[in-house]
Image (cartoon, rainbow, N blue to C red):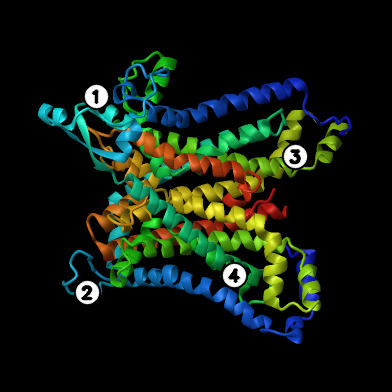
């Protein structure tokens, strides 16, 4: 039910604006679609000139991503017999046999462990701190909040120098625990600021009513405030997860063997002479698509998240 | 953030309500809730920062742990500030900052303006446009080197097709003249949606009654844009510039994967330069001083900017 408004754009204006925006969206999406498409190309299709839009899809990139292969001599091939599985068959086209799994699975799992671990701690600590900042009188509250935010202004490389030394001393370098602690500390600025905003929006009267009804402060916090802040906390959690998931600089400098995450690993996937683009694209696809799904889930609180709560829609 | 009604109400309530009933005092709970966060930030942010400042006055090198560490005073700072190469990386960073912010504001604002015409399905397209910004810059940056390949790269092919040049005749990341623009293009592709979202929030915050009043006064659309739309979006736009400025001053992952600072050191931004000093040449003391200078610069510029932003908001 909308009444006629003189400020409402005309049909023609809408059509014009819409087509320009859709044009931009299609152009901006091209590189991402190209990543997904390249993952399903054969190595020769991937580097064809002119670039191929239509091609015979193959899972070669994915097989190459998850396995290591060795070139087999004709005798070895005879000895190995007929390829037993579909991925054996793909590899056999190139006279190769699968030697074992690649490190991608491990790296991906590291991303999952470190991402979820750091998100969990950032949310638990951040929610508690945000509640306190929102509901209690804390000395130097504004300064503390600003101090928490300012930790985000440091260039990651500048942070990495002392962290590198400290982790070496404490035996935390290249460990999951070290990376989880580090990402928790970085994400705390985001979680405290965002959740602080969300809790501020919950009327304090609910808690007061609960307190008068005989709840303790603690009970009022988790039975009254937390349920109302769930959506906000969930969006904050997704933002923390995306940050930890995407982080590259610190992961590249502080991890190498055991705790390396996927972002520093994906660019190092190489094939014969240079990067194996279908495998790189396959790795990137598996890594990026979850974030796209999360972006769709987040769309209502997107702006709030990326501006640390400075802009609310 | 101005205090809301509820905050004022909260302040007016007797603070010791909980204690009167039972359980821990509010003050104890406040400290239990805040302490872990402060402790972790002290351990992982502040302690290392102090350590960095201390190291910046020494000639310590990580790869020579047994050499004796000497206190060199302000020598590291003097050397950095008088080093021509570092001023060159500062210039590179400035070029990158100015152009990315200019392009992102221009395109981002235009897109927000168009989306605000509320055509059908604008929410869906907004979400699609936002995708690049949420992805891992290192992974995406690495893939862009593929798009930028002469001949086989999609980017070169499309540009070659549109300008009728041979797609193998230019190399975006291999050419000294093109590489600075290669990183500007990818950063703009990635972060324009960020500026767009903030501008969109600004545009949507303008009440339509203002336009209606202007329409009644027979103000032209052009006039309305310059006297209503732009001034009212300006605080939002400035906020977007602040965020992009800080982020791009720190820029590392995207560019290191795209060009690695090359060819030569044409695209060597300060963060990449710092990484070379700290983790390739292992000049720890020197690079600590460098890190402190960068932090002070970012913090100083941001503080000045926030003051200006608040002035604009007050108007």
Question: How far apart are labels 3 and 2 at the CA level?
Answer: 61 Å
Of residue B59 and residue A154, the one placed in the foreground of this image is: A154
Residue pointed to by mark 1: A93
Q: Dot 2 lies on which element?
A: loop
Q: Residue B228's mark?
A: 3
Q: Residue A129's mark?
A: 4
Above or below: residue A258 compared with residue B133: below
Q: Residue B35's mark?
A: none
Question: How far apart are labels 3 and 1 at the CA level?
Answer: 66 Å
Crowding at dot 2, Cα within 10 Å, few <14 / some 14-19 / many 20+, comes out as few
Mark 1 chain: A
Q: Dot 4 lies on which element?
A: helix
Question: How far apart are labels 4 and 3 at the CA level?
Answer: 40 Å
Question: How far apart are labels 2 and 1 at the CA level?
Answer: 62 Å
Question: How far apart are labels 1 and 4 at the CA level?
Answer: 58 Å
Residue at 32% in and 34% down? A63
Of residue A162 and residue A80, the one placed in the foreground of this image is: A80
Mark 3 chain: B
Q: Dot 3 lies on which element?
A: helix
């Amino acid at each position: 039910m909308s009444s006629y408004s003189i400020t409402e754009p005309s049909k023609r204006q809408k059509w014009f604006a819409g087509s320009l925006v859709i044009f931009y969206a299609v152009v901006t999406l091209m590189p991402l679609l190209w990543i997904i498409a390249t993952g399903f190309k054969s190595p020769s299709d991937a580097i064809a000139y002119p670039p191929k839009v239509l091609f015979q899809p193959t899972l070669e990139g994915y097989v190459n991503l998850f396995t290591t292969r060795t070139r087999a001599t004709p005798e070895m091939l005879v000895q190995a017999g007929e390829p037993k599985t579909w991925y054996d068959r793909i590899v056999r086209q190139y006279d190769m046999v699968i030697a074992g799994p690649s490190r991608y699975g491990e790296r991906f799992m590291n991303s999952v462990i470190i991402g979820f671990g750091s998100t969990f701690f950032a949310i638990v600590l951040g929610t508690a701190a945000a509640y306190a900042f929102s509901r209690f009188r804390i000395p130097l509250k504004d300064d503390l909040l600003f101090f928490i935010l300012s930790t985000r202004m440091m260039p990651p490389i500048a942070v990495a120098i002392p962290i590198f030394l400290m982790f070496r001393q404490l035996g935390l370098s290249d460990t999951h625990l070290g990376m989880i602690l580090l990402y928790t500390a970085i994400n705390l600025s985001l979680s405290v600021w965002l959740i602080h905003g969300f809790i501020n929006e919950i009327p304090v009267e609910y808690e007061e009513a609960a307190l008068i009804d005989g709840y303790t402060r603690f009970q009022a916090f988790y039975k009254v405030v937390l349920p109302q802040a769930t959506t906000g906390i969930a969006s904050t959690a997704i933002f923390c997860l995306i940050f930890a998931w995407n982080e590259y600089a610190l992961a590249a400098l502080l991890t190498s063997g055991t705790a390396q995450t996927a972002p520093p690993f994906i660019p190092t996937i190489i094939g014969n002479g240079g990067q194996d683009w279908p495998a790189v694209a396959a790795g990137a696809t598996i890594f990026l698509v979850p974030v796209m799904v999360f972006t769709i889930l987040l769309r209502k609180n997107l702006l709030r998240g990326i501006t640390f709560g400075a802009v609310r829609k | 953030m101005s205090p809301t009604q509820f905050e004022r109400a909260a302040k007016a309530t007797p603070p010791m309500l909980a204690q009167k009933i039972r359980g821990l005092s509010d003050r104890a709970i406040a400290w239990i809730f805040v302490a872990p966060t402060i402790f972790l930030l002290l351990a992982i942010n502040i302690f290392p920062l102090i350590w960095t400042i201390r190291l910046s006055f020494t000639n310590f090198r990580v790869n020579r742990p047994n050499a004796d560490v000497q206190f060199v005073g302000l020598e590291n700072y003097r050397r950095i500030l008088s080093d021509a190469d570092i001023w060159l990386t500062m210039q590179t960073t400035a070029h990158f900052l100015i152009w990315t912010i200019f392009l992102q504001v221009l395109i981002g604002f235009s897109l927000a303006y168009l989306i605000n015409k509320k055509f059908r399905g604008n929410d869906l397209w907004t979400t699609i446009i936002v995708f690049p910004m949420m992805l891992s810059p290192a992974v995406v940056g690495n893939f862009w080197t593929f798009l930028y390949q002469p001949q086989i790269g999609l980017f070169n092919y499309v540009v070659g097709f549109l300008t009728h040049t041979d797609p193998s005749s230019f190399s975006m990341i291999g050419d000294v003249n093109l590489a600075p623009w290669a990183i500007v293009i990818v950063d703009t592709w990635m972060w324009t949606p960020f500026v767009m979202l903030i501008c969109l929030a600004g545009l949507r915050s303008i009440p339509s009654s203002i336009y209606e009043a202007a329409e009644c006064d027979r103000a032209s659309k052009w006039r309305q844009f310059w006297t209503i739309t732009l001034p009212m979006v300006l605080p939002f736009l400035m906020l977007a510039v602040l965020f992009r400025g800080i982020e791009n001053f720190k820029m590392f992952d995207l560019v290191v994967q795209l060009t690695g600072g090359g060819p030569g050191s044409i695209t060597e931004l300060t963060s990449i330069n710092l990484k070379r000093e700290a983790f390739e040449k292992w000049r720890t003391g020197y690079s600590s001083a460098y890190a402190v200078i960068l932090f002070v610069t970012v913090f100083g510029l941001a503080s000045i900017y926030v003051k200006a932003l608040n002035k604009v908001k007050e108007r």
